[in-house]
Image (cartoon, grey):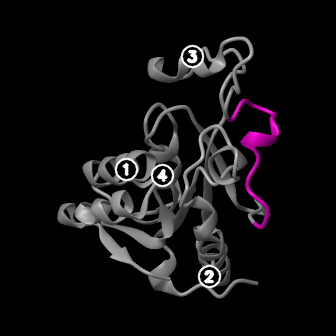
Amino acid sequence: MAETDSKWKKTALLVIDMQNDFILPGGPMLVKGGQAIVPNVIKAVEVARGRGIPIIWVVREHDPLGRDVELFRRHLYSPGKPKPTSKGSFGAELVDGLEIKGDDYKLVKTRFSAFFNTHLHSYLQGAGISNLVITGVQTPNCIRQTVFDAVALDYQSVTVIIDATAAATPEIHVGMQCMSSITSQIYWT
């Protein structure tokens, strides 16, 4: 049984886009820094489980024909193209070492933000969650947009674990520490 401390009762961990197509070499949406953060994301998940913090696995899963994909990515779903994170594909699966268990929650998104056109906010409100901890990829896109939306939705605390998030290059990733200017917190594992 997980040890639940009252300070963690209103906190949830979001693990964003830690899927094969984003993390593995040769993946069509490869985030070059993604593989390096897998151990720290695993550690964050283990800490969350140990503290009784709900874990929300935020994943992209797209229609194989690309009908739900952003306009700028639709070319990736034409005949003969890779069709990244298509529902049911190997590329849409979580990278090895990460696993949805028990009471964990899987949320499917089709845009950068975990909040956009999903029921994440409703789910978190129903669970009494007001504090978020963010891990995953990619910092300038999905991480940043989720953080901005969480702040706009008045979550009390939005924390980004800097060494459990990644971007295409270290320079881009470090540059995203500007998120701290909107009251989110930046921490290392």
The mark lying in front, picked from 1 and 2, is 1
**Residue at (72%, 49%) from the top-left corner?**
20
State if disc 3 and disc 1 touch (CB < 8 Å): no
- Name the element at disc 4: loop
First reached walking from the N terminus: tag 1 or tag 2: 2
**Residue at (72%, 11%) from the top-left corner?**
79
Disc 1 residue type (three-letter): Pro
Which numbered disc covers residue 138?
Answer: 4
| Residue 132 spot, x, y in % from top left | 43, 65
First reached walking from the N terminus: tag 3 or tag 2: 2
Disc 4 residue type (three-letter): Gln
Which numbered disc covers residue 140?
Answer: 1
Which numbered disc covers residue 75?
Answer: 3
Q: Real-space Cα distance between discs 3 and 4?
A: 20 Å
Q: Real-space Cα distance between discs 1 and 3?
A: 22 Å
Does 155 sit left or right of 71 as displayed? left
Q: Local crowd at mark 4 within 10 Å, few (<14), some, or many (≥20)?
A: many
The mark lying in front, picked from 3 and 4, is 3
State if disc 1 and disc 4 touch (CB < 8 Å): yes
First reached walking from the N terminus: tag 2 or tag 4: 2
Q: Real-space Cα distance between discs 1 and 2?
A: 25 Å
Q: Is residue 38 above or below residue 154?
A: below
Q: Real-space Cα distance between discs 2 and 4?
A: 22 Å
- Name the element at disc 1: helix
| Residue 158 spot, x, y in % from top left | 35, 65
**Viewer-side residue, 114 vs 186:** 186
Residue linked to disc 2? 47
Does 101 sit left or right of 65 as displayed? right
First reached walking from the N terminus: tag 3 or tag 4: 3
Q: Real-space Cα distance between discs 4 and 1?
A: 6 Å
Magenta: main secondary structure equals: loop
Disc 3 residue type (three-letter): His
